[in-house]
Image (cartoon, grey):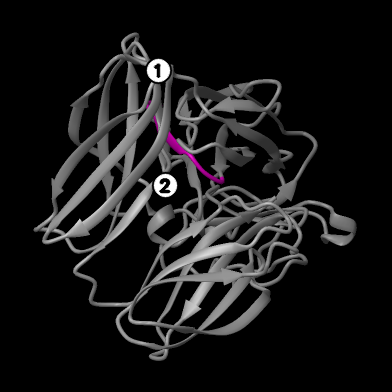
Amino acid sequence: MRKSLLIISSTILIVALCTYATNSKNRIQKLDRVTYSDGNNIGASGAGGSSFAQTGCTASSGCHGTKVSTAVKGVFSGLPANNQVIAGQTYTLSLVITDKGQKRFGFDIFSSSGTFNTTNTFAEVDTNWASNGFPGAEIHHGSSAPTGTSPYTFDKITWTAPSIPGLDTFYYAANAANGDNLASSADHSMLGKPIYLTVNPSTTPVTLASFNAAYAANKVALSWTTATEINTDHFEIERSTNARTFSVVGKVKATGNSSSEVGYSYTDNVAALSGTIYYRLKSVDKNGAFNYSNIKSVVVNSTKNLITNVYPNPVSAGQTIKVNYTSIQSSNVTVEMISILGKKVYNTVLPVNEGSNTLSLMAGHLPAGLYYISIVDNTGATQRLPVVIR
């Protein structure tokens, strides 16, 4: 597992630009210039919002050095020039790195949502990203940075936009090393400027009026209603246990053409599952175009307190944030909002009843950005989910 740390202005991003042990001490310590336990750091001091990067590399680790340099250029392409993307659509990306005389090259690309994939043998998706509790998705060069000549291109990388419309932010970084396997100032890094995207809904000739999921007796009853249909072929019911990776569990034929409401239903047997289960509906047109519904969640045989949903997400300034919370007993919980820098910006204690609860947070006045909603129960157990304020 290769970990390092990239900080762009006031935004913190974990990136992978060298080989580093999974149990390393590479963790965010403060917003100003960061120094790891090995004492290695690069870039500006952070004063005045200037960018800097922390690689965590040492000479003994045999990767790149610690100098942010104008010598290295990184040209990132593949996203629309107007920064408007379509929900669920896949885009092909590339990063061209130029630095005269360098022999080894590395990169990192991060998205605050969506998913990456690649067929490039020198690139890999960070599968540990979600399990480590970080939001979004990340892709970087392999455990051993490739050798080549400048300009070097990392291609055959795809990114699929999230299925739900909203906002997304891309970050990227590139590294060019002289290939002597020694971390020194002769090796260069560059930090790209953030790319702010708007994820627009895909357009299929079906208008979904409602979509609901309800659990009872080891089964989930799914029902939905269309307001209009034009050449709609079918609906696919997709299920997930983590709200990120979905698989098809059922398929229902559509009416096809209708100008009045049409109701549909599907029953999913979940006797072998427990915890929170997530569902979404895929509407597929006869020409192959498709669109996704919002995600619905149900709690199956709950044996612990669970945050099941945060909405709206993203939330606009001034809006009330709602949190669906299932409690195994009546008690009080501590609700906090934590900024991406780890600062507690909201704190309150609320009573909850046994079963399902909807908690209201008057936190829409906070500055735009990514936050975490954290709920601590009376046992001290903590859960958290990300929310974006725009």
Please state the horizontal and vertical placement of residue 317, each as a whole percent of the image. 73, 55
Q: Earlier in the sequence, mark 1 or mark 2?
A: 2
Q: CA distance from mark 1 to mark 2?
A: 45 Å
Report which residue position mark 2 lands on: 126
Q: Amino acid at mark 2?
A: Asp
Residue, x 15% and y 46% (percent of image)?
A: 268
Which one is in front, 217 or 64?
A: 217
Residue, x 24% and y 72% (percent of image)?
A: 302
> Could you tell me how many numbered marks the image carries?
2
Q: Is residue 193 left or right of residue 120?
A: right
Please state the horizontal and vertical placement of residue 47, each as a whole percent of the image. 88, 61
Quarter holding residue 29: bottom right
Report which residue position mark 1 lands on: 259
Highlighted magenta segment, given as a residue range: 112-120
Residue, x 41% and y 31% (percent of image)?
A: 208
Which one is in front, 86 or 91?
A: 86
Which one is in front, 361 or 345?
A: 361
